[in-house]
Amino acid sequence: MKVHYFEDSDSVMMTFREGAKYDNSEEIAEGFVVDFDEAGRPMGLDIEDASKVFNIDWLRQHAYEKEELKTGSMIRDAPLKDEN
């Protein structure tokens, strides 16, 4: 699982599985959009107003940078990025 935090829009994009082929999205609650693959399985989650849901300091330390985002949604629960 991977995470991208976009500070400019205060949004988070999460991916549960990479390589799945996107089919559609559904807003399950205000600001929470689930992305589904062709088989109808959840493949990602987009969250608006992320600072209301997450600890922003945690996101800044753990989220991938925008430049690393190639396609789709992404979240990670990996160790902290190098601060160097």
Image: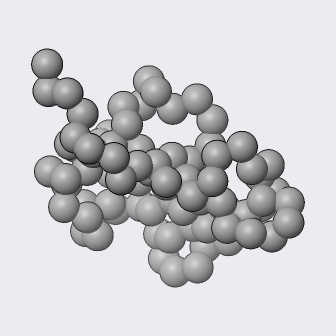
Compared across the picture, whether 59 is left or right of 43 comes to left
Q: Position of residue 23 (x, y in %)?
A: 81, 57
Residue at the right extreme of this rendering? 38
62 lies left or right of 67? left
Residue 16 appears in the rendering? yes
Residue that appears at 44% across and 50% down? 75
28 or 3, which lies in front? Answer: 3
- Residue at 37 percent across and 37 percent down: it is 64
39 left or right, relative to 7: right
Give residue 72's quadrant in the image: top right
**Picture layout, residue 70 above or below residue 84:** below
Q: Quadrant of residue 71?
A: top right
| 28 shown above or below 84 | below
Q: Residue at x 51, y 32 (%)?
A: 69
Q: Position of residue 66 (x, y in %)?
A: 42, 31
| Vertical arrangement, residue 67 with respect to residue 32, above or below | above
Residue sitting at the far bottom: 29
Residue visible at 71% across and 43% down? 19
Question: 31 or 72: which is nearer to us?
Answer: 72
Q: Nearer the viewer, residue 16 or 53?
A: 16
Of all residues, the one furthest to the top in this rendering is 84
Residue 83 locus on image (x, y percent): 14, 27
Coloring scheme used: one colour
Whether residue 9 appears in this view of the structure is: no
Q: Quadrant of the C terminus?
A: top left
| Picture coordinates of residue 76, whole percent (x, y) | 41, 49
